[in-house]
Amino acid sequence: DVKVTQSSRYLVKRTGEKVFLECVQDMDHENMFWYRQDPGLGLRLIYFSYDVKMKEKGDIPEGYSVSREKKERFSLILESASTNQTSMYLCASSPWDRVTDTQYFGPGTRLTVL
Amino acid sequence: DQQVKQNSPSLSVQEGRISILNCDYTNSMFDYFLWYKKYPAEGPTFLISISSIKDKNEDGRFTVFLNKSAKHLSLHIVPSQPGDSAVYFCAAKGETSGSRLTFGEGTQLTVNP
């Protein structure tokens, strides 16, 4: 069974703080993704990575950065948290692209920025 | 530019009846479609998928139909059960998007006992 874990289920931070969200997967997947989920907007891709030290911008990368130093770990960084970054953050992983691959999600981190 | 749209934010059905969730897409390069289910405070879990070379895929109570000419897919759940109450996301990918999925907004399904 694929397991994707996220460092925190709930997080409360103040405006301007630097925030780290960590994600770890145990299935040796090449691809990892960070999404945010907001009501009425679905899942929006922030960043993804297809290999160690590789990263690609998703649809909404502004205000975020990522780090992938090891294959199993993908970190999302909010350099200076703002209230509009209050959201549910979801990490996912998938094996290298083939027609039928699918993404496996972690439980999510509910981030509140005050 | 919402390339995958789920126009119904919510759907309510009676236990035992059919649930039909709809999804439309605009990108003709999409060739693989997936449905995910999400319970509150959990991550989405994969439910069922369909390739563009098929028009139907069935897995137990779940069937996905694809109408390529209309750029429309639907998820049928028969019979619906209270445990099916969740948010359902439609997702799509194409040859040029690699492993990247484009998700719809989601539909909240409520199955009433």
Image (cartoon, rainbow, N blue to C red):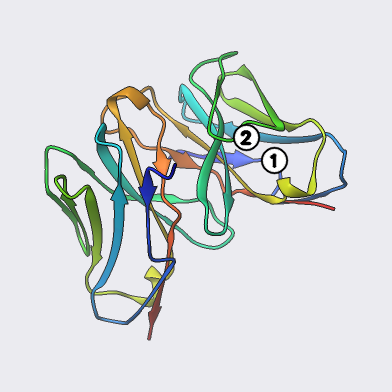
| Distance CA(mark 1)–CA(mark 2) | 6 Å
Residue occupied by mark 2: A23
Task: Say which of A1 and A75 sits in front.
Answer: A75
Name the residue carrying label 1: A7
The amino acid at mark 2 is: Cys
Task: Determine the residue positioned at 53% across, 34% down.
Answer: A59
Which class describes the residues within 10 Å of circle 2: few (<14), some (14-19), or many (20+)?
many
Q: Point out which mark residue B82 bears.
A: none
Q: Please, is residue A18 above or below residue A107 in the view? A: above
Residue projecting furthest to the top = A53
Q: Classify residue B40 by image quadrant.
A: bottom right
Q: Determine whether B2 is above or below A70 in the image.
A: below
Q: Is residue A110 visible?
A: no
Q: Residue at x 41, y 40 (%)?
A: B102
Chain bearing tag 2 is A
Residues tagged 1 and 2 counted as in contact (Cβ below 8 A): yes
Is the residue A102 above or below the residue A57 in the image?
A: below
Q: Label 1 sits on what residue type?
A: Ser
